Amino acid sequence: MKMILTDQSGKQKHRQLEVFAQEMKDDGNRIILLFKKPKNVKGTALLIHSHYNGINDQWIYLPAFKRTKRIADKSKTSPFMGSEFSYEDLSNIELPMYTYNHIKDEMYKSVLCNIVELTPTYPNSAYSRSIVWVNQEKKRLEMIEYYDNTGRHCKTLTSQDYTLYKNKFWHPKVLTMVNMLNDKKTELILNDLNYETNLNDQIFLVNSLRSLDN
């Protein structure tokens, strides 16, 4: 995966990552984001444990300090590695995390979408609500508008260039998060995707983060 950070003037920074994901049989999922390039972020790794009950545990390994830090709930609203994605944005969405209100159906880029309002049920969220556009036919995410705790439209996430796996699972190749308050944006671009790779459970342990890039 490539991460492109673009500032207000259009200046860009490019980063390269590997992402590992594992669905848990009786729970949510586990995800690792591992930075490969450039040299100043190489080896930095974020581990996310998402649970069906809506709790998300996160740890980050910082190679410069050779230590792993747990991300406190109050810190999950912070930007992740200087991007427009926060730690909160990277957490998996589980049903108990929100209440839901179907607002209306509306066309978005020539497709009919269900527009749903999500209100967080968990504490310390940076958002008062989010408005989600779901492709009615394909049941996939098209866009999310995020509103901060003062009611301002603060960020917009769009998903593009989907691929279909097993005729059932949609995966976007491009995720773009635009900050509506400072005109910065971050793109996550998927270069390659492999399924059912039988990842070793051990890599998803907190103590394994420091050895991932060796």
Image: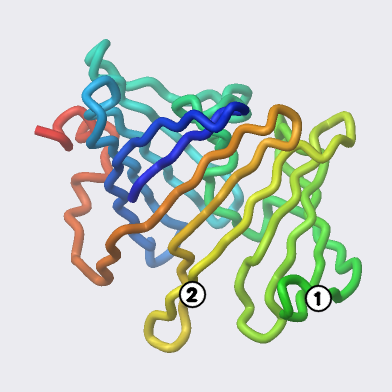
What scheme was used to colour the molecule? Answer: rainbow
> Can you tell which quarter of the image residue 42 is in?
top left
Measure the C-alpha gap from mark 2 to mark 1.
20 Å
> On the rendered structure, is 118 left or right of 66?
right
> For the residue marked with disc 1, what is the amino acid?
Met
Residue in the foreground of this view, choosing between 72 and 111: 111
Tell me the mark number nearer the camera, choosing from 2 and 1.
Answer: 1
Please give the label number shown on residue 107. 1
x then y, percent, for residue 83: 51, 31
Which residue is drawn at the image coordinates 44% and 27% (left, top)?
Answer: 81
> For the residue marked with disc 2, what is the amino acid?
Trp
Which residue is drawn at the image coordinates 22% and 52% (left, top)?
Answer: 201
x then y, percent, for residue 116: 81, 64
Which residue is drawn at the image coordinates 64% and 51% (left, top)?
Answer: 157
Badge 2 element: strand
x then y, percent, for residue 197: 20, 67
According to the picture, the residue beneath numbered tag 2 turns out to be: 170
